[in-house]
Amino acid sequence: MAGRGSRGEMRQFWRTFSRNRLAMFGGAVVSVLVVLAVLAPLLAPWDPNRPDTKKILSPPSSVHWFGTDPLGRDVLSRVLYGSRVSLSVGFVSVGIAAGIGIMLGAAAGYHGGTVDNVVMRLVDLMLVFPRFFLLLAVLAFLRPSIWTIMTVIGLTGWMGVARLVRAEFLTLREREFVIWSEAVGAGATRIIFRHILPNAIAPILVAMTLGIPAAILTEAGLSFLGLGVQPPYATWGNILNDGRDYIEIAWWMTLYPGFAILITVLSYNLMGEGIRDALDPRLRQSRVGRILRLGR
Amino acid sequence: MPKGRARLHHLLALAICGALAACNGELDSRADEVVTSGPPAYGDTFIQASIGDIGGLIPSLTSDQSSHEVGAMIYDGLVKTDKDLNLAPAMAESWTYSRDCLELTFKLRRDVKWHDERPFTADDVVFTYQTMINPKTPAPFKEGFMLVKDVVAPDPYTVRVRYAEPYARAVETWSTYMLPKHLLQSFAEAGTLRESPQNSWPVGTGPYRFQEWKPGEKVVLVANPDYYEGRPYLSRIVYRVIPSQATIFLELKAKGVDYVNTLTGIQYARQTEYPAFRKAYHKFRYPASDYTFLGFNLKDPRFADRRVREAFAHAINKQELIDGVRLGLAREANGPIRPGTWAYTDDVKRFAYDPEKAKALLAEAGWKDRDGDGIVEDPDGKPFTLTIRTNQGNDERKKIAEIIQQRLKDIGVQAEIQLIEWAAFIKEFVKPRRFELIVLGLGTGTDPDQYVVWHSSQRGPDQMNRTGYANPEVDRLLEVGRRSCVQQDRIRSYHQIQRILAEDLPMIFLYYRDALPVVSSRIRGVSPAPAGILHNFDEWYVPKAQQRYTAG
Amino acid sequence: MALFALRRLLLSIPLLLGITFISYVVISLAPGGPLDFLTPEDPNASPEVKERLIKEFGLDRPVYEQYWKWLKRAVHLDFGRSFLPDGRPVLTKIGERLPITLFLNLIEMAIIVGLAIPIGVLSATRQYSLYDKITTVFVFVGFATPDFWLALLLLILFGVQLGWLPISGLRSLNWEYLSFWRQQWDFFAHLILPIAVATFGGLAGFSRYMRQSMLEVVRQDYVQTARAKGLSERMVISKHALRNALLPVITILALALPGLIGGSVIIESIFAIPGMGQLMVQSVFSRDYPVVMGNLVIVATLTLVANLVADITYGLVDPRIRFGGRRGRR
């Protein structure tokens, strides 16, 4: 059941997706960004952390394409290395969120009853807290390091995935093959992994793809407030923060990292929306589809 | 300008102001450009930016800078610091020491009145003393008073203070702000000073009276017409709470504030040089009284070896730090006593920037790069790694850490940086001495006595000897220096202390920054001096023609 | 209907408790304490202050005791006094900030909804047209732009370079001396930039949802029926499709409410607006326990209330719930 017709579905998916030019553009940019991030150590022309007090805040030139920062460090190199942080925060925190969401959603959807109730109350509870407030509170008390940030963003973003997974379970539980499997005595884990999850993968992926830009923006915001990774490591948010005081004499400190964030988030969103639209016909009538679109 | 035309211009300006929102109440903004000198005149409002809201209006109970800035205008002490950093009379018109330095007698002025018209007398002084030493009073600074044996007021305008032992900073202690006995006696005894009306509507003896406090927004003071040194010229002071450094700077450029003293090096040197700014503001520069340092944790066995500390000192290029962090607007520090003060000496050992020498010293101490990874290791192969810690929110210290990190990398020491929120930093790392290197600053005050920082008895978690320094010779010199009340005798001790500290290197003194205040150009009477520019604030004025805020 | 509302109300109670509990857990994570903020890095500070303050604020008792004591008082809306030297009641401090944040966010919400609905509807009815494509791109860019970046850029442009708009706070200094109309204008001028920045981002999400919802509805049978019946396109859209399409939008509004009440932290910092977000940042940095707790609890509680209101409104509007039963599309 899980595998049947999937190749045909993939082809259908690709056909719809590739017709969406914006989505293709988004996907292309994302790929380029990932490559740049991975190859940053090879591509960066300067050591991103080495100060040079003779070159403080110098404008873009042939030597420093993006200019230098208040300690004389090359901004281009810092933006390149910063992309590694932003992307890894994006991936890992969304991964953590998805992990938690899948576990809790599966538990709720499969077992139903009290477990379901408890999980849904927990979801409601977490949703009632303004995310940034909660993040601030936790981060200001724990030491801000890249792992803390990733974990905390993940811990506050699992609710959407949990709902999705739960809905998928509720829908699929009634299907015959599950009842048949249970009758035959297949264990819960087997059912979950072999039958239910593969169907849920697609919407989960969409949710994750759309969660990455949110995580990147959140990390940038936190770094901007000074709650990000420790110096001297560059992230886009803290380059913006470093340049905040000099904005009218050093526009390059604000323009380039801000633009990098913009392009990254934009591309992920376009790509994610494209994926969602391409999956749309299949999901339109389903409960899962409603949740993806409307959040409830 | 003929009256009729002035009128017309006035009306035109108003009309334009009515159309544009950006006028902010300026009735005649052309006046700024007219640069004439006018005779001293009363009036106008002085607007100062404050990065934090005040913690309260009884400065004796607070430790934040804002409440002390405001408090300095509302309250007065018996003595004050004059422009040359010497102690000068304030509410006391004179004082004398007894021969044995154990008795200090103040003669008070007779013309001082509280803001509610009641006379200020010696009873208030005695009351203030008793309040400060009262255990129920949560005052952060009471050290000086604890050494007093007793205080008596033989007549309403004489105060006699007796000390158990000679205390060099005795007179300086009495620059503390005086509190009104007739209003606060019951509160002080009950320990409820913080809840008293004084904390939201203070009555003092200073040049300015309190008018209003809108929490989170502003504090407004008005000139005290009965001030014993004469009514200040500037009629009002408004402290605007603007919690972001960046916004303060923008407000400055938009002419929304008249005085800022927290400009960074880059702001001062590069962002305030354009013609419009130079016309609207005067920039000043004078050496400030605090220095920044890199502190070693002397408990750490690696730093017990003096060669390692010297290696670090040679690895750091102080001029580079000054250039990179302050854009040159600071001077090298080689000791804890401020250059230009009476106890300062130049004759101390220095460590020039010399990475090769640093590496050699490290090698001597057993640290060599044995595996070619760029990091030095001890004979057991353990690499030299450490963490440089400083507090969050201080851009200068952050940059210092970043530069030092790279310089240490050059000599084979791998350093990570940790920025920690102030309260946590102090509580978890500094006090229990769980650190390796810290970047911090210290203020030097007017008196060179630094017993609390260098004496071996001050190494407790709540005390100021953060590096854990202990040298019996320095201890002795500190005690000697503290016990005299004659300046000449003390100089020798302090010169020697500076020499020993430079050799022992419990910390690497980095620099004394320059204060970089900026004042609106319409304000006259500003005269920079060793104590800064605020020393004669009461004499600042704005000529009538240039007064901007004429609401009284 | 009434049953529905009652059920929702009852469910809120454990949520409230959960809010206080989570808040307390968060705070106890803090390794540092508030006292050290009160004593400065100055050689002359006195050490006995700590002992006194520990006793005063009851910080030497075990955590659960502190929590219970705190909870008892919180029920009476007494969150204690701030740890900062000004020692004012937490509720007062929050009360000063809440109206501004609420006011600002309500305006933003109104603008966003007011603009997003027509934009979304138009996009849906003209799907794939040039208009749709352009608004899509525009809206996406808005969604992707970091709000603090936009704030800085606009602030420099309009505040400093052009000098048209004030750059911080809510009022000019001599606000009291202005005429009534000047006062209103002044207040308005101070709000333009922060609101512009905040709505720019929010517009994207909402118009997307509106478009999506509209698209879904338009494909439904009853809309085709209405068209077939010969009703004008306008009638079809506004009377039938729109009403149904609005339902999920209310849901989205409810989901966006946490942001509404919580305030936009970064915008408030940049524009120096004395709201809840700024209070939160400041009290978190100064370890002002009571204020952080009070803030967190109040914000979460208000969000809960807003959710409740949204749920009930949804219930009123959605005939399925109003009349019970499970009719309607699935």
Image (spheres, rainbow, N blue to C red):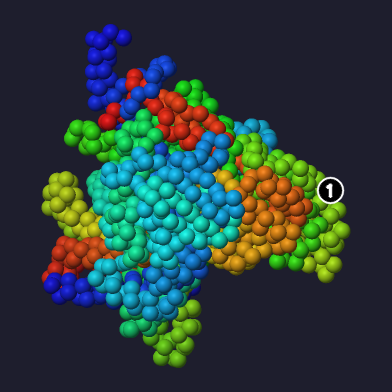
Looking at the rendered structure, the kind of residue marked 1 is: Glu
Task: Give B168 or B188, whichever is nearer the viewer.
Answer: B168
In the drawing, does residue C5 fall left or right of residue B302? left
In the drawing, does residue C6 fall left or right of residue A106? left
For the N terminus of chain C, the image quarter is bottom left
For the C terminus of chain C, the image quarter is bottom left
Q: Which residue sits at x=55%, y=48%?
A: B97
Q: Position of residue A79 (x, y in %)?
A: 59, 46
Figure disc tally: 1
Task: Give B488 or C102, whichever is nearer the viewer.
Answer: B488
Task: Give B288 or A281, whichever is nearer the viewer.
Answer: B288
In the drawing, does residue A273 fall left or right of residue A226? left
Q: Which residue is mark 1?
A: B356
Q: Position of residue B463 (x, y in %)?
A: 58, 63
Report helix, strand or loop for mark 1.
helix
Q: Which residue sits at x=32%, y=28%?
A: B43
Q: Which residue sits at x=53%, y=53%?
A: B103
